[in-house]
Image (cartoon, helix red, strand yellow):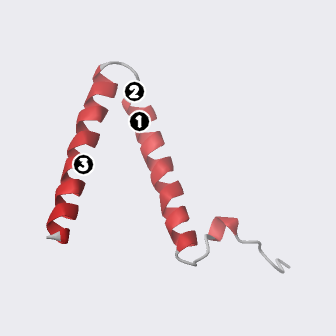
Amino acid sequence: MRIFLLTALVMVAFAANSVLTRFAIAGGHIDPTGFAVVRVLSGAVLLALLVVLRGGRVPLLRRQQGLG
């Protein structure tokens, strides 16, 4: 039952995202390029956050040692 509810929640979230995207672009609130940039950057930030929370390291945030 839990997997069914989680699957339904994800499907509703994807549908809501699609509808909100269409409203934003059609209404002239954001252009498609700006929307794509926001989407890619937010995805990258969320992925980095998930990696850090799981105990991993984000290469861009790691200090480099001994470059010479």
Query: Where's residue 5, x and y in %?
Result: 18, 62
Element under label 1? helix
Which residue is drawn at the image coordinates 86% and 79% (left, top)?
A: 68
Element under label 3? helix
Which residue is drawn at the image coordinates 53% and 71% (left, top)?
A: 51
Q: Amino acid at mark 2?
A: Asp
Q: In the displayed orientation, state which residue is furthest to the top.
A: 27
Q: Residues within 10 Å of mark 1 (few under 14, many from 20)?
A: some
Residue picked out by circle 1 = 35
Q: Is residue 20 left or right of residue 36?
A: left
Q: Amino acid at mark 1?
A: Phe
Query: Where's residue 23, x and y in %?
Result: 28, 26
Distance Cα–Cα, label 1 vs label 3? 16 Å
Q: Is residue 16 left or right of residue 54?
A: left
Query: Where's residue 31, x and y in %?
Result: 39, 26
| Circle nearer the N terminus (1, 3) | 3
Number of the label disc, if any, that sits on residue 14: 3
Distance Cα–Cα, label 2 vs label 1? 6 Å
Circles 1 and 3: CB atoms closer than 8 Å: no
| Circle nearer the N terminus (2, 3) | 3
Above or below residue 63? Residue 11 is above
Residue picked out by circle 2 = 31
